[in-house]
Each structure stands twice: as structure tokens, then as C-alpha cells.
Image (spheres, rainbow, N blue to C red):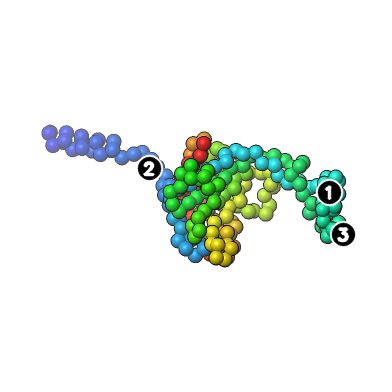
Amino acid sequence: MHNSLFLLLLCACGASATPDTPPPSTTGLRGTIGNKPFVARSALVTDVNTTRQLSAPCDAEQLEEAKTRSEWFRTHPEAWSTCGSTRNGPKVLASQIAIYEREVTCEEARATGGRIAENEHAIAIDLTGVWPPAPNTRLRSHAEDIEARSDHVEASFRDYRPSDGNGGYYAFGTVTIVEASPKDGVLAVDLADAEGESKARGTVRVTVCP
């Protein structure tokens, strides 16, 4: 009788100590940048919901101004369709996300303007859209069929090497915002460059800088 009671209490205690749903892993973002290992140590969202004005085709007055500034442009009518200006362009909200291979604080990011040090690596993500977005928002990076005003990301691998003037590479793929709030969030990243020198995959928790 006493042994049965003891076993019953032991089982009950063991069950209560086990969480129903384990928290998602947020420490698994790793890969290579410039053929060098990259492991994410911190991630920040800065310039949150900044208003940005996109480029739009030049109106007649702007086109004439462009012709005046450039003799080549004036004498090459086939190039006139490339004239663009932000004067009449649509406005969107945008934020900047940076993923670092070391611990970086909001104060340091503000002081450096987001620049990385020599031979340091990072992932930069330019987010067009409102922060925080809906859970599990999946956005493509540098997709050619994305309309500029729609929600999307433009990601890049940062690899600052003054010796050869290299600043980084376009990063193609997806960024999924698994969860987000005004203070933080979790990203699932699956990115690679066109040359195969850089790639990153996994999840990372981001802190939103005030």
C-alpha cells in the first residue's frame, strides 16, 4: 500500500516538471560568409518603421532637368525611360535588421551607424513593411517579381575587407518572421549568395532598439 502511494506521487511530480511545449530554439543561425564560418551571436532591429519615399518615373519637368544636367542623357532618348525620382514616389515604412557574429548592443549600433569593423561579418536585412508583422510572415529577398511597395526584404552578407574593396554580397532566399512584438522577435533565415561563397540558415532572436 505504501509502496504504491510512493510510486504514484513520484510519477505525478515527474509529469509536472516537464513543460507541455518546449520553447523554440533561437540559437541555431549559422553558415559561412566569404567562405568563413559564421555563427549568429546577436541581432538587432533598428530605425523601426521609418518612413521611406520610393522612386517613381520622372514627370516632364524632372525629365527636362535630367537632360540639362547630362549631355549624354539628353542625346540618348532610349535612356529617358530610366529617369526616376523620389519627389512623387510612394511612401512605405521600413526597418533595418542586422545579425552579428558577436554581441552588439543598441547603443553600439547607434554609435557606429550599423557599420561593421574590418574583417567582421554580419547579415543585413532591409525590411519594407510594418514592424511587428503578423506571426510567420515569410518574405523573399531580392525577388524580381516583388512590387516595390509590397512587404519584402533585401538581404546581404556583409564582409568588410578594405584590402580588396569588398563590402558584401546580395543574399537570396527567404526571411520568415516567426514571431514579433514591439520589443523583440524570432527570425528563421534561409539565405545564400549567387556565387556559393556565403550562406546562412537557422533561427535567431532579435531585439528591437528603442
Question: What separation in Å lies between label 3 and label 2 (alpha carbons)?
Answer: 66 Å
- The earlier-in-sequence mark between 1 and 2 is 2
In screen coordinates, is 78 left or right of 97? Answer: right
Disc marking residue 22: 2
Q: Nearer the viewer, mark 3 or mark 2?
A: 3
**Whole-percent x and y of residue 189?**
51, 51
Who comes first in sequence, dot 3 or dot 2?
2
Q: Can residue 41 be seen by looking at this rendering?
A: yes
Q: Secondary structure at mark 2?
A: loop
Q: Position of residue 17 (x, y in %)?
A: 28, 38
Within 10 Å of disc 2 (Cα), the crowding (few <14, some 14-19, many 20+) is: few
Residue 65 numbered tag: 1
Q: Position of residue 38 (x, y in %)?
A: 46, 58
Q: Secondary structure at mark 1?
A: helix
**Crowdedness of circle 1 by 10 Å Cα count: few (<14), some, many (20+)?**
few
- From the viewer's side, name the closer residue of 186 and 60: 60
Residue under label 3: 75
**Amino acid identity at mark 1:** Glu
